[in-house]
Amino acid sequence: MNWLKDRLLSAYYFDENLELNVRVLKLIGFYTWIAVLCSVPCFLIAGYNLSAYIVSGASFVLLFASFGVFLYTKDTNLASIVFCYVVNLVVIPLFFLYAGGIYGGVEFMMLCGMMDGVLLLYGMVRIISEIIYFSWYAAIMLYSTIHPEVVQNIPSGNVAVFSICMCVGFSTVIFLVITDYERYLLKAKQKNVEETVRQRMMSAETKSRFLSNVSHELRTPMNAIIGMSGIIQNTDVDGELTEEISIITHNARDLLSTINSILDYSRLESGKLSLSYDQFEFSQMIREIIQEAAIRAEEKGIDFFVDIDPDTPNILYGDYIQLEMIIQDLIHDAIDSVTDGRVHFRIRGKYSKDMSKAIFSAEISDTGEGISEEDLKSIYSSFETYDSRQDSRIKRLGLKYSVFRGILKLMNGDFMIKSLKDVGTTLFISFEVFTVERIVLADKSFTTGKKVLLYAYGEKGASYLDEVFDSFGVILETAYMPDAFAKMYQEAEYRYIFISENGYADLSDIIKDEDREKVFIITDRMGTPADFDGLRIVRRPLNSLNLSDIFFERWEDMDYMDYMGARLGEGFMTPDAKILVVDDNMVNLRVAESMLQKYKARVKITESGYSALEALKTESFDLVLMDQVMPGMDGFEAMKLIRSSLVIRGARRIPIVCMTADSGGDIREKVLTAGFNDYLSKPVKESELERILLTHLPEDRIEMAVPDAG
């Protein structure tokens, strides 16, 4: 049997180099020939006449002829059809008529013939053919019942029993052969699937490591370029290099955005992009985005409006890093596309029915150059096919938007864009995040019905301001001229008074001294302008966040901005703080050192994990900033050795922050799980560095200061 399998069957049925349908055709042909050959001795034993032997010989010739079609055309489908029709319409009916009919047991062979059609034929051809076979067999049986004389060699007694047993035996063997072969095919397929999965997993792991390395190698020099550009810009007191540095910084950030998009798109394609989850405040995330965007819009001289629903859920649990990146990037793109116009950012959030999730929708509209209908149709795939005639900006947007759409879909959201050339663009995004507590941005029950006076002289977007105030349910009265303001001010009592900075000079003598505490000047300027006489200010864009701080009198406690003009980063120094910076790249060390010098910190730099351990053994530090990827000893290994050291004083309590160029969505979880206190993403943002210093340095190392007026 092994010889038969190794020498004969392996050459036809277990040869992986042959197509499956070819092997099945040969297998069915093989057992059909065997059945025809074995019929000859059976006829001899049963004593059948010459007609039965003639049918056997003719059938053998017809079967060879049908296989000749395959040998001649090499068309497996055509050969299978010819073979099935020859077997079912000619060979088996002949055996039925000349080998005893139903008393010879040939009806069992009919079942085998129909099974051949099921195995060899596909689609509608199979269905139609099986109907034809069944109808033809039924017609032959019916005709032979009406005209029994057409049936030859009708057996009786022991001969009939023998004939039926032989047909049942043949049929059983055929079924067993087919079943065994199907089992073999299933095992082979399972083995191939397992091998494919294993190879794909190895490929995905290799790709993941490659992407991580590429991310680090690309983002590390970008950290140096952006960092050094910022340092030069800060030291350029005379402003001689402002334009040149701005060009370098803008293009470097544009390149960094493209790099991030490429890496994230590769992760999406390979299924390696995952979300990280952490608790965060929606108001804090949006506040930082708005502040940075407002400065960017101010530099370009365009209007930036923000509309946030006060009923939006605030305490959330989700991937705020990805959300911040998407919203911030889209707003920046909108601002960059406008030369003289406006950008309007609207966002709404509501609780799901079971209160377990917050469902968000946002719009970012601009009056920029817009996108043509032709480019808009292909924007999601424009990066896949290079076309030198196509706008490179469209290619970059297509790549970025594809990544954003993929990330948002992971959050059960979506991304959509509408645009008209030379009119403007509106981006629509939606996403879901989990909720932690049922707390909204602002409880409107405390503001509804309060009277507010707005002097909107020269204020752009006055109708937009109406919507912002209306969302709090306040009673807003607006004046556009000094006389109208004076009349309203004298005739009614207002809880708060908002005055556009362009019109304050006309009202300075009207405002009563006892009302000055409820007056807020709407301005773009930083610091406390001297001409406002110490009045509180609120920076544009006026929105639900800064209005809620005013309405609920939270301005005294805000760390992002006191309403006398101090911003985070201008309001503290760390002259007594000792900080150790560890990085194998000297340029990155120089960037970090220069950024920390702004806060007067005492900085020590070292280029390896080994030297960091030695430094910590001899000196005490308040904070360690350590690179993730370093030769010899990486940041993870160095951190673990520091924590377990018995020589380093306070080894378990020293705040160690991982500086990483890895942009993976799970990097935060990976870093914190490993034992780091926090992490800084390269290129390092000044706002993030400030957060690290304020969060991890001891309170007695931080000296708060209010910047000089003006």
Image: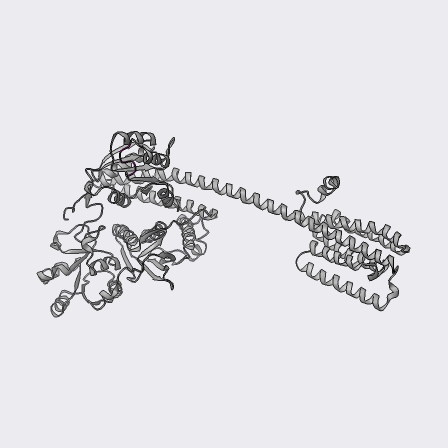
Residue 56 part of the magenta segment: no
In the picture, measured across the screen, residue 88 lies left or right of residue 625, that is: right
**Nearer to the camera, 78 or 318:** 318
Query: How is colour applied across the structure in the image?
Result: one colour
Give the vertical position of 678 relative to 307 (above or below). Answer: above
The quadrant where residue 341 appears? bottom left
Residue 24 visible, this orientation: yes
In the picture, measured across the screen, residue 694 lies left or right of residue 633, that is: left
| x 15%, y 60%: residue | 519
The quadrant where residue 609 appears? top left
Q: Split into 4 quadrants, where in the image is the N terminus?
A: top right
In the picture, measured across the screen, residue 490 lies left or right of residue 469, that is: left
Give the overall secondary structure of the magenta segment. Answer: loop
The quadrant where residue 117 appears? bottom right
**Nearer to the camera, 95 or 618:** 618
**Nearer to the camera, 286 or 103:** 103
Give the vertical position of 378 relative to 680 (above or below). Answer: below
Residue 651 part of the magenta segment: yes
Residue 388 visible, this orientation: no
**Nearer to the camera, 49 or 508:** 49
Residue 311 drawn at (x, y percent): 30, 62
Residue 566 drawn at (x, y percent): 18, 49
Residue 490 drawn at (x, y percent): 11, 68
Q: Hey, which residue is sitting farthest bottom in the picture?
A: 491
Highlighted magenta segment, given as a residue range: 648-652
